[in-house]
Image (cartoon, grey):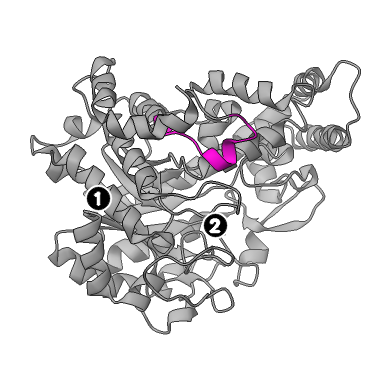
């Protein structure tokens, strides 16, 4: 099917996707059905949305809840409670059109970030990282302001906490990662004791101080190998900034029998390879062979990358254990970043079955409208180093086969076309199959996520088709993303329509 027809056909033939899901090995099975009672699906499914404090400040708590409930059929709020990043908090980002609700004044100059609830300092005595109240909305307490009104409507409330920081936050410099050149970064070392203490302190504060239903943890930082290669959808390539080589990482490596000096030497060699590749200096045996030779000579490169993943997953386990100790009925989820969809190597480091043992639910990013732009950027990145010998269009077709992608647009037209609803279906189905009923899968649906000027902009039809695709693939719910302050109400209406048709019948 030609790509330009795939979206229209999907909308007209939603029943075909339902049949496809039923015909597969998971027919009639949903992790949610295995974990809960026999209530109707409409009462169990989570129809969520990510939303920050600024939306309630701009539009009023009751007004926003009315819109979300009546137009989007939302029954679960993921309130951005802690972050210093504008991806989950703040109004529309500069250069993008404002949606048809909320303030039309940019907060670029006033945005600060922090804890949008009220931090209780007694919980943070044992960490150098300070938990400061976000100053841009005065004394506004997001959780205290929204929880009572939302609970009256029967809505579930999850506090979203994101590992995004500002360099001027007290404690960040002391806890920062160290890159290959010995420079301190703006990201935090997950093996630093104060960092581990901070995350458990934060969720303890939230879960003891507020009547939330659980926590959703965001951490989109990649390991040193992917960072060195730029093998993601959102970064440029700077192999000298691979992390982390601080004393705490060294200690963690020693405990696991990893040679720190060999690992660092291997990443220096990798840096030389990447820099030569970017200049087009081809090794005699080609880029791919030279890269594999480097991994064989320095297996510590992969071991160091795996060590980063271990630190990331330890934080999740610690958060989960902490929350359950407070209240065993509270739920903990983990955001699975978009690179998990694009990168076969990254997929190999992320077992859904293993992740399902550490969380009650996984939010799996299936953003298809902005996905075309992101996937194209990923292909161009890996095509400039390890796969530089392969024509980019051929490289993308090969990667499509590895990822089980369907009939997507060509590389040149991919940003403007976006990825199809079929992509959402396949990624959701893969996650559902991967967790084997051990936790819930909530599909992250792209609604209004900013893209470049020439790239696809989300429409109501896109929101409708993607939402239907996720539920037809067996999702236990959806999370409309990235944030309400970017979304047009017509797209929220369309997602709500898809929810009512697929979940409520």
Q: Going 32% across and 57% down the picture, which residue do you hit?
A: 490
Which marked residue is nearer to the observer: mark 1 or mark 2? 1
* Helix, strand or loop at mark 1: helix
Give residue 464's position: percent from left, percent from top.
Answer: 31, 43
The residue that label 2 is drawn on is 195
Is residue 224 highlighted in magenta? no
Drawn side of residue 65 relative to residue 134, left or right: left
Q: Where 262 falls versus 183 (above or below)?
A: above
* Helix, strand or loop at mark 2: helix
Question: Gap between marks 1 and 2, in whole Å?
Answer: 39 Å
Q: Earlier in the sequence, mark 1 or mark 2?
A: 2
User: Residues in magenta?
Assistant: 410-423
Q: Where 337 falls versus 357 (above or below)?
A: below
The crowd level at tag 1 (other Cα within 10 Å; few <14, some 14-19, many 20+) is many
Q: Going 60% across and 27% down the picture, which residue do you hit?
A: 345
The residue that label 1 is drawn on is 496
- In the drawing, what numbered circle is on residue 9? none
The crowd level at tag 2 (other Cα within 10 Å; few <14, some 14-19, many 20+) is many
> Is residue 127 visible to the viewer in this orientation of the structure?
yes
Q: Where 178 falls versus 498 (above or below)?
A: below
Which residue is the extreme one toward the bottom? 138
Residue sitting nearer the eye, 187 or 88: 88
């Amino acid at each position: 099917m030609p790509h330009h027809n795939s979206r229209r056909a999907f909308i007209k033939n939603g029943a075909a996707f339902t049949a496809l899901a039923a015909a597969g090995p998971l027919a009639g099975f949903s992790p949610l059905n295995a974990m809960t009672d026999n209530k109707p699906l409409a009462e169990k499914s989570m129809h969520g949305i990510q939303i920050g404090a600024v939306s309630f400040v701009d539009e009023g708590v009751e007004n926003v809840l009315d819109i979300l409930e009546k137009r989007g059929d939302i029954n679960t709020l993921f309130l951005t409670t802690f972050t210093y990043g504008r991806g989950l908090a703040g109004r529309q980002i500069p250069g993008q059109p404002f949606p048809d609700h909320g303030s039309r004044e940019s907060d670029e100059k006033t945005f600060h970030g922090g804890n949008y609830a009220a931090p209780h300092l007694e919980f943070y005595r044992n960490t150098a990282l300070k938990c400061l109240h976000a100053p841009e909305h005065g004394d506004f307490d997001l959780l205290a302001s929204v929880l009572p009104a939302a609970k009256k409507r029967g809505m579930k409330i999850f506090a979203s906490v994101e590992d995004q920081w500002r360099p001027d936050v007290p404690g960040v410099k002391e806890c920062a990662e160290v890159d290959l050149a010995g420079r301190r970064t703006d990201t935090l070392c997950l093996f630093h004791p104060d960092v581990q203490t901070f995350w458990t302190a934060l969720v303890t504060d939230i879960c003891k101080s507020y009547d939330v239903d659980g926590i959703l943890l965001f951490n989109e930082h990649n390991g040193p190998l992917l960072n060195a290669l730029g093998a993601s959808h959102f970064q440029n390539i700077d192999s000298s900034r691979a992390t982390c080589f601080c004393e705490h990482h060294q200690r963690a490596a020693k405990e696991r029998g990893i040679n720190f000096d060999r690992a660092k030497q291997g990443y220096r060699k990798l840096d030389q390879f990447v820099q030569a590749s970017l200049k087009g200096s081809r090794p005699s045996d080609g880029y791919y062979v030279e890269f594999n030779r480097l991994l064989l000579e320095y297996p510590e490169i992969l071991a160091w990358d795996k060590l980063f993943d271990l630190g990331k997953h330890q934080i999740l386990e610690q958060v989960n254990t902490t929350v359950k100790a407070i209240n065993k009925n509270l739920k903990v989820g983990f955001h699975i970043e978009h690179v998990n969809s694009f990168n076969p190597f990254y997929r190999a480091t992320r077992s859904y079955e293993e992740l399902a043992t550490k969380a009650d639910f996984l939010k799996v990013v299936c953003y298809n409208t902005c996905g075309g732009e992101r996937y194209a950027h990923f292909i161009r990145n890996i095509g400039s180093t390890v796969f530089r010998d392969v024509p980019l269009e051929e490289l993308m077709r090969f990667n499509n086969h590895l990822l089980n992608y369907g009939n997507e647009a060509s590389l040149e037209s991919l940003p403007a076309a976006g990825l199809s609803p079929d992509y959402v279906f396949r990624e959701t189905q893969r996650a559902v199959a991967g967790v084997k009923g051990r936790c819930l899968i909530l599909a992250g649906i792209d609604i209004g996520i900013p893209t470049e000027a020439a790239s696809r902009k989300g429409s109501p039809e896109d929101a409708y088709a993607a939402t239907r695709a996720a539920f037809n693939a067996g999702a236990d719910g959806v999370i409309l993303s990235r944030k309400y302050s970017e979304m047009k109400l017509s797209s929220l209406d369309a997602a709500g329509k898809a929810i009512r048709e697929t979940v409520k019948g």
